Amino acid sequence: MLGGFCSLVATMLIETFGGIYGGVLATSPTIVVACIYTIIKFSNTHNDVIESLYIIPVSVLLDIIYLGSWIYGPRVVNRFY
């Protein structure tokens, strides 16, 4: 329940403050810790927890790359067209 609420708040932050500021707020440790708590609470085994938590650093990295593409992507495209 807490993880779902934090995901909802993160989505609202992104929609309210835009991709850059909302993305930074959504990837803050507060949101991640609540999601981790939910994963740990509802997982059956230790291996389920480990497998679920491996994706968090990957998703933060993908979020950074995605936000960077929105900042620098148009500049690169405008050079060629």
Image: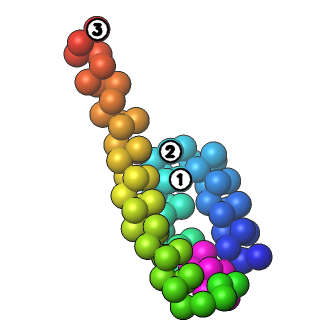
Label 1 vs label 3, nearer the camera = 3
**Identity of the amino acid at label 1?**
Gly
Instruction: Specify which label sits upstream in the sequence, 2 or 3.
Output: 2
64 to 77, vertically: above or below:
below
The residue identified by callout 3 is 81
**Identity of the amino acid at label 3?**
Tyr
Q: Answer yes or no: is residue 42 visible.
A: yes
Q: Report which quarter residue 69 is drawn in.
A: top left
Residue depicted at 45% across the width and 60% down the height: 59
Frontmost residue, 40 versus 27: 40
Task: Specify whether 2 is left or right of 34.
Answer: right
Label 2 vs label 3, nearer the camera = 3
Q: Dot 3: few (<14), some (14–19), or many (≥20) neighbours within 10 Å? A: few
> For numbered disc 2, what is the local secondary structure?
helix
Quarter of the picture holding the C terminus? top left
Task: Specify whether 43 is left or right of 62.
Answer: right
Q: Answer yes or no: is residue 37 visible.
A: no
Frontmost residue, 35 versus 25: 35
Residue depicted at 57% across the width and 71% down the height: 31
Quarter of the picture holding the N terminus? bottom right
Q: Dot 1: few (<14), some (14–19), or many (≥20) neighbours within 10 Å? A: some
The residue identified by callout 1 is 22
Mark 2 to mark 3 CA distance (whole Å): 25 Å
> For numbered disc 1, what is the local secondary structure?
helix
Instruction: Specify which label sits upstream in the sequence, 1 or 3.
Output: 1
Picture coordinates of residue 21, whole percent (x, y): 48, 52
Picture disc at residue 19: 2
What range of the chain is rendered magenta?
35-41
